Structure formats: structure tokens, C-alpha cells
Image (cartoon, helix red, strand yellow):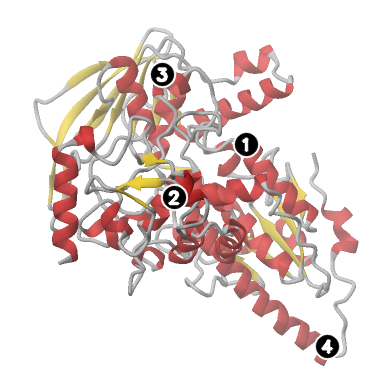
């Protein structure tokens, strides 16, 4: 059977690693073709032969690729090397870790031509990426067609290809009994090559509807909504309260995971396509939200879930205890100001949060916790410890976590690997909760006390007598976000759900106020970038249907909306 063949080949490779198909350079071993092959005797005349799991060297083929080739994800740059800078984790073309085009083809060949590709269903990719299609195109060397298929469903593959945890790989059929296809690696290789080859160019909209939309928030949901609405012919303006466009893409995700030039490149493209961007515009603050609504035909709220979960224990108000997003944002601002030559020593003294030479404790796991660990390591911290409330995950799927669900298993993220490389141990401590913070005479945090916990049917329970004291000069709270800030929803009188998110039905995205739509984390709660893009696209579809109906109603009533609302924009410029 197929399963038996895969199991046997995998076991054979594992039993003799020195003779396995992956070479010392991290790629499948190859043999260059002989001269007679180059003369065209064989179809694969200019392509090297690749070593398979059975030890033979054969031309690359896709029919049984998932059996013949091993999963081989492109590695990050070496930990001790990348800790010396703030550059991206992913290797550049000059790095030896970077996969060759042959290795990309081998990995694409592992895509199984499934009857039901779960990778692009709701258990896999939220934006329903056409993964088997562009895997096949990469196998056939059709890179230009691949970026077209990728952009059909994903506005920003250069973002998701870098920061998404890849639920598509967790749902990959090949992952049932072997390693899943390296979908994430293939995704960002497609879009990076498209940018380098000049295949991504501005799509200038020729026909405008005369309808206008204000999008509040420039994170992935807001940018996706704006992109879609603009291409539908509506005139779009995006309002962002920060000084740069991008939301969490700019300030919430550190540079080593997503370089800010990558964000700016896409934003500049959207600007060329006709989208207007307004920064330092705090809607509900220095810009009146009702006036904004009155001057546009529709309003889309994609403001994110920015209210962090706090830790109300004794000593919480000590200096040196910060929320994760405060820590990450100020670090990113310092990097950007340094690069632009605008860093002021007084700003650094008064505002910047440094981990240099400090014992750092990060409370909470997940991607944000890992980012705080990685940032602290690049500050040259004295030590870093990561507390997690839940027990350590199992090494393999538990019975209650079957495929194609996201595998809740133990893994080593980039920040953890960096701590191991420097300090020789994993920074994570499981099944522990903070009881209180300890301060010095000057009101600075100097440590904290924890208790071990056990998980019961009623939730985590502290174990009496398990108290431990930990040194800490900097504590970062990375326990997620509870809801969006509420001043916009209060001003508009929007209905909220039981979690204080803006109430709008999934798939419809209309709020309780006519002409106002909501999507992304402010509607569904804290989630992934790829879910934000999905919701932004959904907001655009719903908003477009509303605008078409509004246009028809206005025409039927004998009024014209051709002038649009942009003639009045000067009256709602932010007061800054």
C-alpha cells in the first residue's frame, strides 16, 4: 500500500542517515547529467538527477514525489549569526542555507494531487490559497503563473509566507504519515521571485464607481479590504493613528520576522494603485468619527484587538513591568529612527525599553512571546525565562487533536533556538503562574514569585507550597489581547458581543449601524494575519454589495453620487 511504502522508505532513510537523500548542504543530493543527456536523448536533458529515499539517483518526478523525497524545509539563518543583527531570519540568496531552484522543485513534487486538498479548506488555509495549483506550477517551472494563482486568494503572500504559522501544513494530507509539504517556504519563494523579476506591478483602476470608503486601521485586515475595494472601483482612504502604515505588520511584528521594507514596498504599490493613506489620524481622537462617516459612503473598521490581557497581582505597578506590544513597538521605532538618522538621545533615555544586561522574564507563550524573547536576545540580555501557564505539549498529536486540526505539539521556535544556542537550555517553564512581583526601594521590579499549577476541569489551580522566587529586572506580559479599544464603538453606538468585540455576523460583516462594517481581530478576536486578510476581503465584498445597492437607490431617486465625498476631505484632516 502507499502508506506501507512511505513508512518503509522513511524507516530506511532514518536507519542510515549518512546515506540519506539530504546532503550536508541541507538539500537533496544531486548528480549532474552526462553529456549524452544534454544532447537531448532524454526529456530531462538539462536537469540533475536527485537522490531518492531508496538511494537511487533519478530525474525529479511528481507522481510519487511524496514517497520518493523527504520534507526538507528551508532553515533559518544560524542562531549565533542572526543574533548579531536585526535582519530577517530567512536566508538571502547569498546564504548557503538558501534552497536552490532544484530543491524548490523537489519540495513542490511532494504535493500529492489529493482528491480533497485539506490544505486549502477551513481546517487549513483561511484564505483558501490554491496550494496544489501553485505547487504544480512551481514543479513545472511556471513561476509567473504561480504568482497569478497566489494573488487570486492572497493579497499579501510576502507577509503570510513569513509570519503565518502555516495551518495549511498542519492539514496537509502528506502529513498524515510523513512530513507535510513545505507550503510556507514555497509561498514566499513565489512572491519574492515575482518581486525580483518585476512581475508585481501597479494595477491601475480605469473605471471608478464614484463611491467612497474610509478604512480605519492599516493592519493586514485594513490593507486587504482597501486593496479589494480599490480594485472594485471605489475610492478608498485608509486612516491610521500611528505615524506609519502597517498596523501590527509595522510595529507588532519585529524586523527579524518581517522587514519593514517589505511592508513599505506593498504599501507603496497600493498607493500607486490609487489608495490614499492618512497617518497620525486617531479616529475618535483627533478625527471625529461621525464626521468621517458623514463624508464617506461607507466606513470599514479594521482596528484590531489592541487591549492587552493584564496580570492583576501585587506589584503590577512596579517600574520594569511592560506589555509585550509596548516593548516590541518601542524597539521597532528605535530601529527605524536609527536607520533614518532620526534617533534622539532623549527619546532613547525616556522612552526606549531595553533588555540589555537584564534578567528578563516573558510571561505568556505564542508568537508574541517568542518575539519578545528574540528581541531581548538581540538586546544582549543577561538571561531570559519564558513562563507558560499550560503544561508542555506532547511530542506527537494527542488523541483529542486529530489531523487535519492544527497540531498542538511541542516545537522549537526561532527565539527558543536562539536562547538554546547562547545559554544552552530552553527558556520555557511550563505549568507555572505568577503570584506577585517584588520591587526594590526605588519602585523597580527585581523579581517575582510563582506557583506551580495543575489543570483541572474548572481550569488551572495553584499548588500550595510550590512557590518559587525568580530574579527579574524586566518583565514582559505577553498573554494575548482581550478586545479592541472601545472609544470608536461607543461614539458610533455599535453593538458589541459578549467578549466586547464589535458585533458583526461572520460572512456579512455589517455592524448594527448602517454603512459601517467591521472585520479582522476587532470582530473575531485576536487571531492570525492570514485570518485578518480573509476577513478584510470579506469586509470588501459586503461593503461592495452595500455600495452597489446604495448607488442604485440614489440613481433611482434621481440623485447622483458621482461627485463623491472627497471634495470635503479638508474638513476632516487630523488636528495634528
**Secondary structure state at the residue bearing disc 1:** helix
The tag on residue 425 is none
The quadrant in which the C terminus is found is top right
Where disc 3 sits, the SS reads helix
Q: Residue at x 35, y 39 (%)?
A: 29
The N terminus - image quarter? bottom left
Query: Residue 392: percent from the left, percent from the top?
Result: 19, 38
For the residue carrying disc 2, how many other residues have a C-alpha within 10 Å: few (<14), some (14-19), or many (20+)?
many
Q: What's the residue at 55%, 27% (across, down)? A: 87
Looking at the image, tell me whether mark 3 or mark 4 is earlier in sequence order: 3
Q: Which residue is mark 3?
A: 80
Q: Is residue 134 above or below residue 85?
A: below
Pick the front one: 534 or 139 = 139
Mark nearer the viewer, 1 or 4: 1
Locate residue 323: give its quadrant: top left
Tell me whether circle 3 and circle 1 mark residues in contact (CB < 8 Å).
no
**First along the sequence among labels 1 and 2:** 2
Callout 2: SS: helix
User: How far is the residue under mark 1 from the one under mark 4?
Assistant: 44 Å
Residue 291 visible, this angle: yes
- How far is the residue under mark 4 from the one under mark 2? 47 Å
Q: Which numbered disc, 3 or 1, marks the residue that appears first in the sequence?
A: 3
For the question of whether residue 405 can be seen, the reply is no
Q: Which residue is mark 2?
A: 184
Instruction: Calculate the distance from the C-alpha at mark 3 to the C-alpha at mark 1.
Output: 22 Å
Mark 1 or 2: in front is: 2
Q: Are marks 3 and 4 in contact (CB under 8 Å)?
A: no
Q: Which residue, given by chain and number where applicable, does mark 1 sit on?
A: 260
Find disc 4 in the rendering and name its residue: 555
Amino acid at each position: 500500500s502507499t502508506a506501507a511504502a512511505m513508512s518503509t522508505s522513511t524507516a530506511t532513510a532514518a536507519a542510515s542517515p549518512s546515506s540519506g537523500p539530504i546532503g550536508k548542504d541541507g538539500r537533496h543530493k544531486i548528480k549532474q547529467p552526462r553529456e549524452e543527456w544534454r544532447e537531448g536523448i532524454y526529456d530531462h536533458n538539462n536537469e540533475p538527477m536527485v537522490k531518492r529515499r531508496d538511494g537511487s539517483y533519478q530525474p525529479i518526478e511528481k507522481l510519487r514525489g511524496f514517497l520518493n523525497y523527504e520534507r526538507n524545509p528551508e532553515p533559518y539563518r544560524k542562531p549565533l549569526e542572526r543574533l548579531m543583527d536585526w535582519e530577517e531570519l530567512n536566508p538571502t540568496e547569498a546564504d548557503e542555507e538558501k534552497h536552490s531552484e532544484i530543491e524548490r522543485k523537489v519540495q513542490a513534487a511532494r504535493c500529492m494531487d489529493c482528491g480533497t486538498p485539506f490544505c486549502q479548506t477551513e481546517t487549513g488555509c483561511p484564505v483558501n490559497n490554491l496550494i496544489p495549483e501553485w505547487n504544480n506550477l512551481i514543479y513545472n517551472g511556471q513561476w509567473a503563473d504561480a504568482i497569478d494563482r497566489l494573488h487570486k486568494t492572497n493579497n499579501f503572500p510576502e507577509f503570510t509566507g513569513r509570519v503565518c504559522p502555516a495551518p495549511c501544513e498542519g492539514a496537509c494530507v502528506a502529513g498524515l504519515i510523513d512530513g507535510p509539504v513545505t507550503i510556507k517556504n514555497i509561498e514566499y519563494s513565489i512572491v519574492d521571485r515575482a518581486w525580483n523579476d518585476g512581475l508585481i506591478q501597479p494595477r491601475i483602476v480605469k473605471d471608478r464607481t464614484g463611491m467612497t470608503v474610509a478604512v480605519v486601521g492599516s493592519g493586514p485586515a485594513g490593507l486587504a479590504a482597501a486593496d479589494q475595494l480599490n480594485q472594485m472601483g471605489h475610492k478608498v482612504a485608509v486612516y491610521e493613528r500611528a505615524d506609519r502604515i502597517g498596523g501590527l505588520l509595522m510595529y507588532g511584528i519585529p524586523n527579524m520576522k518581517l522587514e519593514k521594507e517589505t511592508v513599505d514596498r506593498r504599501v507603496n504599490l497600493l498607493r500607486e494603485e490609487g489608495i490614499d493613506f492618512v497617518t497620525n489620524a486617531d479616529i475618535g481622537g483627533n478625527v471625529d468619527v461621525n464626521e468621517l462617516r458623514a463624508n464617506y459612503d461607507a466606513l470599514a473598521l479594521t482596528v484590531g484587538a489592541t487591549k492587552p490581557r493584564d496580570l492583576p497581582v501585587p506589584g503590577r505597578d512596579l517600574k520594569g513591568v511592560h506589555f509585550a506590544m509596548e516593548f516590541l513597538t518601542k524597539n521597532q521605532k528605535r530601529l527605524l529612527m536609527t536607520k533614518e538618522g532620526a534617533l534622539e538621545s532623549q527619546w532613547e533615555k525616556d522612552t526606549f525599553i531595553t533588555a540589555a544586561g537584564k534578567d528578563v522574564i516573558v510571561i505568556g507563550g505564542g508568537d508574541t512571546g517568542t518575539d519578545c524573547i528574540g528581541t531581548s536576545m538581540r538586546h544582549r540580555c543577561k538571561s531570559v525565562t519564558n513562563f507558560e501557564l499550560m503544561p508542555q505539549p506532547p511530542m506527537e498529536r494527542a488523541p483529542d487533536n486529530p489531523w487535519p486540526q492544527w497540531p498542538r505539539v511541542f516545537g522549537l521556535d526561532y527565539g527558543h533556538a536562539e536562547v538554546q544556542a547562547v545559554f544552552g537550555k530552553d527558556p520555557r517553564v511550563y505549568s507555572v503562574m505568577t503570584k506577585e512581583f517584588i520591587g526594590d526601594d526605588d519602585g523597580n521590579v527585581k523579581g517575582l514569585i510563582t506557583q506551580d499549577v495543575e489543570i483541572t476541569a474548572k481550569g488551572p489551580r495553584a499548588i500550595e507550597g510550590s512557590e518559587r522566587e525568580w530574579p527579574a529586572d524586566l518583565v514582559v506580559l505577553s498573554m494575548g489581547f482581550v478586545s479592541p479599544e472601545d472609544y470608536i464603538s461607543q461614539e458610533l453606538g455599535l453593538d458589541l458581543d459578549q467578549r466586547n468585540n464589535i458585533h458583526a455576523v461572520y460572512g456579512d460583516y455589517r455592524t448594527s449601524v448602517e454603512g459601517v462594517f467591521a472585520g479582522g481581530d476587532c470582530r473575531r478576536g485576536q487571531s492570525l494575519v492570514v485570518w485578518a486578510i480573509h476577513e478584510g476581503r470579506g469586509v470588501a465584498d459586503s461593503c461592495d454589495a452595500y455600495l452597489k445597492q446604495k448607488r442604485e437607490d440614489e440613481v433611482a431617486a434621481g440623485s447622483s453620487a458621482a461627485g463623491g465625498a472627497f471634495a470635503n476631505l479638508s474638513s476632516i484632516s487630523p488636528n495634528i
